[in-house]
Image: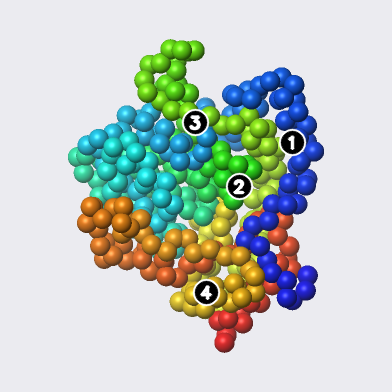
Amino acid sequence: MTKAEGVPYLDLSREFDSLKDEWFSMITEDGARGSWILGPNVHAFEKQAAEFVGTAHAIGVANGTDALYLSLRALGIGPGDEVITTPYTFFATSEVIDMVGATPVFVDIDAASFNINPDLVEQAVTAKTRAIIPVHLFGNPADMTAINAIADKNGLAVVEDAAQAFGAQHESKRVGSLGNTGCFSFYPTKVLGCYGDGGLLTTNSNEIAEAVRKLRNHGAAAAFQHDEVGMNSRLDEVQAALLRLKLKKLDENIASRQRIASLYDEKLGALDIICPERPQQGSHAFNLYTIRSSKRDLIRQALMDNSIGNSTCYPSPLALQEVYKHLSYTAEDFPVSVALGAEVLSLPVFPDMSDEQVERVCQVIKQAVSS
C-alpha cells in the first residue's frame, strides 16, 4: 500500500468474493424449490440465530426498524404511553415510538460509553412510562444490569436496540437476550450484515414470539385469517441464506474488528484523542470505532483530503431536531449528547482491513493533530 492510497470506510469486496459461490448455490436451490418467502433458509437462520444470541425465539423481519416497531406492538404499547430512550442514536430508535402512537422521552447519555445513562432513566420514569429502549451504540453494550433493575422496579418492558451490536456481550450474555425483546439490523454496514435490508427480533417470551410472527405477516393467524392489522415484514429467503453463511464466521469477524480496534488504541492513544471505552464486563463488537477530539473537524478534513472514509455519528441529538420540536427540549437537557456531536468521529473498521490501512489512517490523524 503506497502512502497516497486512500482507505474506504467499509470494504465488503473480499468478503463477497469468499461467499459468492456458496451463496449463489443456495439461491439456485431456492429457485429449484420455488421457496422464496419464509422458506427453509429463513427458518434455519432463525434457529441458528436464536442459539447464537441465547434466546428461545428469533424471528426474521424486513429490517431493524420493523423489529423495534413490532416489539412495541407485541408489548401493547400505544397512545398515552411513554417510552424512555436516548437522543444519541439513529432516528429509527425513536421513530418507532411515534409510529405506535406513544411519546418518546429522551434522557442524556454517559460520556464514556455513548450509551443511555441509567441514573437519568430512573429520574424520567412516570406513571405513563411503559418501556425503555436502550441502544448498544457502535457495538458497545449498554449497562443492562442497571437498566433491567429500573425496569423490574417499575414494571417496565425493555426493548434492546442491538442494531449495531450483533455478537456483543454484557457480562456473560449476548445482547438481544437481556430484555423482553432484542432488535437487530442486517443493513450491509452492520457487524452481521446482508447485501440488502434485513432484520431480526429475539425474545424468550412465547407470547411475544407468537404475536410478532402474526404481525410480520399481515396479522395472519392462518392463511386468509387475520386477527389484527399487521404488516408485511418478512426476512428475504435470499438474504437469510447469506446470513447463515456469515453467522458461521461472525465470532472470527468480531475478533478481527477487536484486533483492529486495539491497533487504533495503540497508535492513537498518545495523541490528544479519546479512544472508545471497553465494557468492564462483556465485549464490544466494534460495529464502529468512534473517537473523540476537540480537533474533530480538523482531523476529518485531513482524512477526507486523503480519501479516507469516516463518519460523524451523530451530529445533532434527536430530541433537538425539528420533528420533536413539540416536546420542547433544549440543548441544556442533553449536555453530553450535544458535546459529543461536535467531537466524535468514526474511523474505518471492517474484518478485512489490513494493518497497513490502519497505519495509514493513524498517520493522517497524527499529522492533523500535530499541525
* Dot 4: element: loop
- Residue 70 on image: x %, y %: 42, 32
Residue 85's place in the image compared with 241, above or below, is below
Amino acid carrying mark 2 in the image: Pro
Q: Residue at x 50, y 45 (%)?
A: 163
Residue found 52% across the figure and 78% down from its top: 298
Q: Which residue is mark 3?
A: 233
Q: Quarter holding the C terminus?
A: bottom right
Q: Is residue 98 something that shows in the picture?
A: yes
SS at mark 3 in the image: loop
Q: Nearer the viewer, mark 4 or mark 3?
A: 3
Upstream in sequence: badge 1 or badge 4:
1
Name which residue type carries label 3: Ser
In the picture of the structure, the residue carrying the numbered disc 2 is 188
Query: Mark 4 or 2 closer to N-term?
Result: 2
Q: Are marks 3 and 2 in contact (CB under 8 Å)?
A: no
Q: Is residue 4 left or right of residue 237?
A: right
Residue placed at 40% from the left, 46% from the top? 93
Residue sitting at the far bottom: 371
Amino acid beneath label 1: Trp
Name the residue tied to disc 1: 23
Query: How far apart, in angstroms, are the residues tagged by discs 3 and 1?
Result: 23 Å
First in residue order: circle 4 vs circle 3: 3
Query: Callout 3 environment at 10 Å: few (<14), some (14 to 19), or many (20+)?
Result: many
Label 4, on which residue? 273
Gap between marks 3 and 2, in whole Å? 18 Å
Within 10 Å of the Cα at label 1, are there few (<14), some (14-19), or many (20+) other Cα atoms?
many
Residue at point 40%, 36% (across, down): 69
